[in-house]
Amino acid sequence: MDNITNLTVHELVEKLKSNELTSEEITKAYIDRINDKEKDVGAFVTLTTDDAEKKAVEIDKIRSANAQMHKDAPKANAESQTSSENAVCNDELSEFAGIPIGIKDNLCTKGVKTTCSSKMLENFVSPYDATVVEKLNKEGIISLGKLNMDEFAMGSSTENSAIKITHNPWDLNRVPGGSSGGSAAAVAGDLVPWALGSDTGGSIREPAAFCGVVGLKPTYGLVSRYGLVAFASSLDQVGPITKDVKDNAMLLNIIAGHDEKDSTSYDIEKKDYTKNLEKDIKGMKIGVPKEFFGEGINETVKEQLNKAIETYKKLGAIVEETSLDVAQASLAAYYIIACAEASSNLGRFDGIRYGYRAKDYTTLKELYVNSRTEGFGDEVKRRIILGTYVLSSGYYDAYYKKAQKVRTYVKNEFDKAFKKYDVLLTPVSPNTAFKIGEKCNNPMEMYLADICTVSINIAGVPAISLPCGVDKEGMPVGMQLIGNRFEEEKILNVAYKFEQEIKFRENHKPSFEK
């Protein structure tokens, strides 16, 4: 049998159904893997492996009892056709019951620390579960722990974590991307079979690209944000990070849906995102915006994406170059809107109502200043200051109001593009994963790395990142497929057909496995 931790979730589900594996065996395999490799990767902030093992044993007992009941049901029904108890068999457990998962540390988990990888929340234990976590629990999915991230999701490398540095499994000297770097590294390193991340300007897609896994930023409002510690409320979205596209569609099935506790949640008809994965893409129109392939995009990244374009042509898709001149404007608007919302959302962390409280102070003002100075990292402070500035009297119209007008322009440009094309294809990042420490002293260079991803959050449309090849140093190159609002099934279909064609997972492995 293949190494358990190398299997996809859909493969694990089949092995549970056929009794080739138990939940305890799967969970134990992942715990052993964490014990062996976590010291190298550094993906977790908090581990809940003891609790996970207990839950796996309980689920196996229920599954065994259900199987026995199913076996005894024909005999019992022959004796008594009226017994309603005997009609209940396997419906107590979902097909995913007993499958482990990792959860980004900005999603609230009842009774478990939710730190946002910040000193400000280093001891915060949530009294409730985020809606997406409730949905996982309902399915019987078992959390192995909380995953590292850039502090309050602000960053593109996970180097802004106040807890630890996370390393990329493809090269332990490189960053895993951010802010969901712990989630992507854990999936790429087989420490979890799948994970939840959050995406404000590329925070699922960029680490997925850097770590050679699949990451989806859903349409804004498709997945509940209730229980997600807010960075920028009008941009944040929870999404899945997985080993392959089918797993991604399955996890989206679980977490998508209307939530009355989230006022931005859309009430749309429930879909099965796995249904159209195998659909033929012959005749589908794919637009390639030339502006996303311009100056600053690494030549190897362009080369791999051009190969991907040829693959799509081979699959029968109609691929055309188009114009979508939104990247530069989106980047400027994003950092104004995101920082403005961050300065508002993080105002609650003051040492009195929430968060870390400084020990040395003599006045109320000193308590505020010292608590926030000691509790927040440099990047968070930088964004709070910028956000407060653009919202201040005299600057609001000059910056924030203009940024919102740009947002409307970007949305309209995407609307025009999707009248002509089913899907848009772009890079995820201008480069592959860079060395740890290489860019942390240059915030502007880090911000510019988001140029291919932020427009998607500005427009509220869905986008998926999947590996399309490797560069000359063997690091994964990410391809981004963008769809119209609530058309996740379309980009998943286009991604799946490409994945099946190039078989990236079969041909490429992270370096620490070699």
Image (cartoon, helix red, strand yellow):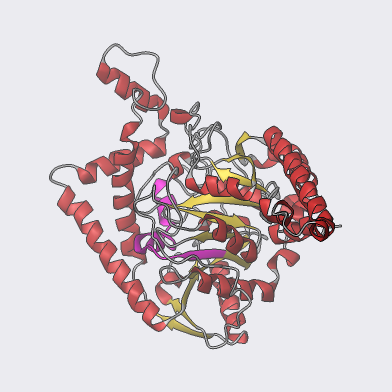
Please determine whether, in this image, residue 425 is positioned above or below residue 128.
below
- Residue 9 sits in quarter: bottom right
Q: Quadrant of the N terminus?
A: bottom right
Residue 482's spot in the image, x, y percent? 46, 70
Residue at position x 75%, y 66% in the image: 506
Magenta segment: 442-465
- Residue 366 sits in quarter: top left
Residue 206's spot in the image, x, y percent? 52, 56
Please determine whether, in this image, residue 59 is positioned above or below residue 499.
above
Residue that extends furthest to the top in the rendered view of this protein: 362
**Does residue 446 appear anywhere in the picture?**
yes
Q: Is residue 306 magenta?
A: no
Q: Quadrant of the C terminus?
A: bottom right
Please determine whether, in this image, residue 323 is positioned above or below residue 23.
below
| Closer to the camera in the image, 336 or 423 | 423
- Residue 326 sits in quarter: bottom left
Residue 111's spot in the image, x, y percent? 55, 31
Residue at position x 47%, y 33% in the image: 118
Residue at position x 63%, y 77% in the image: 278
Count the labels in the image: 0
